[in-house]
């Protein structure tokens, strides 16, 4: 017999024989009959298996406990019990792997998220994490589908990078040196010309700079890969290793950029609502009662578009007692971003035209000489979910900025050449995949929307 997934079985008609393989969620019953709730990961819903205790070997039956994996063959029938439409009357049971009930850590419901993080190798088995990681898959698929359907090309930018122009002190070094005894030059300094790549290298903080080069030829590209930041931010919104989606588009100005950011995020939310209904409903009931309403609300409303200067104005007039001061020239902090989104405008907000001094060197300079064509997208409960900009395509202006900031221009020669040969207006942004996951799942901590989180002092598993 061919094994079938529980998702398909639950969608099918009774009256036939089926073979399922999966893990025991719960088992209850009497001396005569046992009811096993089985799950195989294909859906949050379990299939009920009914076992006539007299018909099976006692020793085998004893091994059917929470967490055990098994194969069940039997007849699919309508269930007379409440809570499920169908059940399987077991005829044959094979245990693959028992799970000693004395030792299996996931016995009871309602373990804390903190505890589950310590057993991240097993937390997939819980309803919550099953739902989260099915949604994570769907969201990743939707990213590729959206861009593919729009004619964007998926560009693989390097994970090991020789440029640290963007990283400024927040990068993880990549080396094959014996750290206890690295080769030294004449001045007693570590000699990186002897290292694997013949130079200093780091893990990338962004694929943008390389992405721009792709866009200035292929037209519209996106990256979707891991990025690494050695910032010591122990917050519910920062990881040291996270996944970022970075579209980069030739001939887009910042208004086109905003249109794309809004259409793209709405598409992803809608995709999950349309395709992950059971999982979202579960999370709405168990994790965050406002989830569905929030997702639908974002879909139904236009994002607000304001400039940084307008945002500072709103914040200054709020009468709030801020932890971080508000003033033109200061960066917006999470508390400010969330006030704008959750209390003032009550919907996602796109803030543009930030002061030049608090944004990256490559952003397009406005005529006022003070601001750049930056774009941050702020979401309810999350704050910044997207950071982007129109890029400075003028060689002289870009060079002037690089010199002002003392950025090592030699390392950026290839990036600068894009402005020498056939330069063109272009724009792009970076969407933090896990930040979007937080929004879409209602989970509260970014450590709980990536399978194995890396954060300061934590790289277990
Ligand atoms: P923040 O101010 O929140 O630290 P950032 O300004 O450093 O973010 P960008 O460099 O603009 O962020 O990166 C683009 C996007 O990547 C952000 O909008 C966010 O969604 C995501 N992101 C940035 N840093 C992290 C991180 N440490 N962990 C998870 N996602 C991140
Ligand atoms: Mn940051």
Image (cartoon, rainbow, N blue to C red):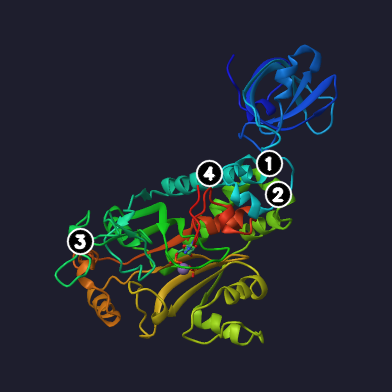
Identify the secondary structure beneath mark 2. loop
Q: Which residue is mark 4?
A: 137
Identify the secondary structure beneath mark 4. helix
Q: Earlier in the sequence, mark 3 or mark 2?
A: 2
Identify the secondary structure beneath mark 3. loop
Q: Where residue 106 is drawn, which disc sits there?
A: 1
Residue at point 69% right, 49% down? Answer: 283
- Where is residue 251? Give x, y as percent: 33, 63
- Where is residue 78? Give x, y as percent: 79, 22
Density class for disc 3 (Cα within 10 Å; few <14, some 14-19, many ≥20) is some
Q: Nearer the viewer, mark 1 or mark 3?
A: 3
Q: Where residue 183 is drawn, which disc sits there?
A: 3
Density class for disc 4 (Cα within 10 Å; few <14, some 14-19, many ≥20) is few
- Where is residue 431? Give x, y as percent: 47, 59
Looking at the image, residue 134 sits to the left or right of residue 258; the answer is right
Location of residue 170 with respect to 219 vertically, above or below: below
Q: Earlier in the sequence, mark 1 or mark 3?
A: 1
């Amino acid at each position: 017999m061919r094994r079938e997934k529980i998702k398909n079985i639950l969608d099918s008609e009774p009256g036939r024989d089926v073979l399922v393989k999966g893990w025991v969620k719960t088992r209850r019953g009497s001396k005569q009959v046992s009811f096993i709730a089985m799950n195989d990961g294909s859906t949050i819903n379990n299939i009920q298996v009914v076992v006539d205790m007299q018909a099976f070997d006692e020793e085998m039956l004893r091994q059917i406990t929470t967490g055990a994996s098994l194969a069940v063959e039997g007849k699919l029938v309508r269930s007379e019990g409440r809570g499920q439409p169908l059940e399987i009357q077991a005829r044959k049971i094979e245990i693959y792997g028992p799970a000693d009930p004395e030792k299996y850590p996931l016995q009871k419901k309602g373990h804390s998220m903190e505890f589950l993080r310590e057993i991240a190798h097993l937390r997939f088995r819980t309803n919550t994490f099953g739902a989260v990681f099915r949604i994570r898959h769907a969201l990743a698929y939707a990213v590729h589908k959206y861009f593919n359907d729009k004619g964007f090309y998926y560009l693989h930018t390097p994970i090991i990078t020789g440029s640290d122009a963007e990283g400024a002190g927040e990068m993880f070094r990549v080396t094959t040196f014996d750290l206890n005894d690295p080769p030294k030059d004449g001045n007693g300094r570590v000699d990186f010309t002897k290292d694997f790549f013949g130079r200093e290298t780091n893990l990338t903080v962004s694929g943008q700079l390389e992405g721009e080069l792709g866009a200035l030829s292929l037209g519209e590209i996106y990256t979707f890969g891991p990025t690494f930041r050695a910032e010591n931010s122990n917050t519910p919104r920062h990881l040291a290793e996270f996944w970022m989606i970075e579209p980069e588009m030739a001939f887009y100005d910042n208004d086109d950029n905003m249109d794309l950011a809004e259409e793209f995020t709405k598409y992803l939310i809608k995709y999950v609502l349309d395709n992950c209904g059971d999982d979202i409903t579960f999370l709405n009931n168990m994790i965050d009662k406002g989830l569905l309403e929030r997702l639908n609300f974002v879909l139904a409303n236009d994002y607000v578009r304001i400039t940084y200067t307008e945002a500072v104005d709103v914040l200054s007039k709020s009468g709030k007692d801020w932890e971080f001061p508000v003033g033109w020239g200061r960066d917006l902090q999470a508390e400010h971003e969330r006030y704008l989104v959750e209390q003032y405008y009550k919907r996602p907000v796109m803030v543009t035209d930030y002061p030049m001094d608090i944004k990256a060197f490559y952003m397009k300079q406005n005529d006022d000489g003070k601001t750049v064509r930056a774009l941050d997208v702020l979401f309810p409960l999350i704050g910044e979910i997207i950071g982007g900009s129109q890029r400075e395509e003028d060689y002289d202006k870009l060079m002037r900025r690089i010199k002002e900031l003392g950025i090592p221009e030699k390392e950026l020669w290839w990036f600068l050449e894009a402005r020498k040969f056939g330069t063109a207006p272009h724009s792009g942004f970076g969407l933090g995949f896990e930040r979007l996951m937080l929004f879409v799942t209602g989970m509260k901590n970014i450590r709980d929307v990536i399978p194995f989180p890396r954060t300061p002092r934590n790289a277990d598993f």
